Amino acid sequence: MLINDLSSKKDDKSLVNLPTLAPSGLINPTPTIAQNLISTDQMVNCNIDINCGGGAKYISKEACLNSTCCLLGDKFIQYDDKNKCLYDRVLLSGSGSASFTPVNVAAYVSTYNAYIYCKPEAVSQIKELDKIVKEWIEKVRKCSSGTQYDYSNCLKNCTDINSWPICSQNCRDKSSISACDAFKEYPLNNLNNAISASCG
């Protein structure tokens, strides 16, 4: 049994309904996702169980949610990783294989500004996908800030059907609309799929 299991006190819920965007031409990211581009893992005063020395430690909320005061034999030891505590307990009990069922760990996903509980082996992949989505959203923002307007206004001058291909290509080149090709990458689905498969 983990002592002072902070995940049992968490006030953040796992993501249940993941938003998806349907790419159709040029779109703006949803306000919820766009505003979270600047969000970061919040720092908190993490309370340490009295058995592990008490007091508080100023660390990230993710690190706080994953820490525990672990009873090993007759001693309490502060651990940054609940699964390491479980592993060491199995070793201390004399089991040579050190087999145990890992518990889900908290991972901060900045795209949703949320802490979600995932299988430990999936956290690094989810964090990498989260980083890719943040970069993609930034491309969407840059593309949406005037490029679409310039391109559309230029196309209004392409009235001759015979010169349409050349005229539309010139508009594309002048407006830097090619930056909007970032929408084709659409990595949000990959992040949502990874979260659905490994978190909850």
Image: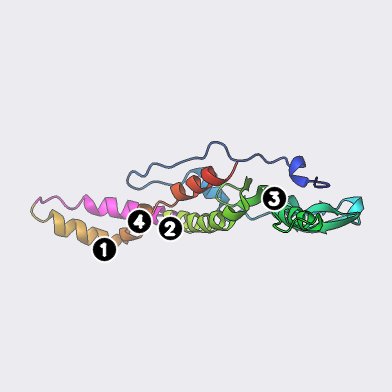
Between label 1 and label 4, give the one nearer the viewer: 4
Query: Label for residue 173?
Result: 1
Q: Residue at x 36, y 45 (%)?
A: 23
Q: Amino acid at mark 2?
A: Lys
Q: Amino acid at mark 3?
A: Phe
Between label 1 and label 2, give the one nearer the viewer: 2
The residue identified by callout 2 is 139
Residue closest to the eye, 61 or 75: 75
Residue closest to the eye, 189 or 93: 93
Sequence-earlier tag: 1 or 3? 3
The quadrant of the image that shows the N terminus is: top right
Q: Amino acid at mark 4?
A: Cys
Q: Residue at x 76, y 58 (%)?
A: 80
Measure the C-alpha gap from mark 1 to mark 2. 17 Å
The residue identified by callout 3 is 100
For residue 48: magenta? Answer: no
The reply to whether dot 3 and dot 4 touch (C-beta < 8 Å) is no
Which residues lie in the magenta part? 141-161
Measure the C-alpha gap from mark 1 to mark 4. 12 Å
Residue 47 seen in the figure? no
Q: Amino acid at mark 1?
A: Asp
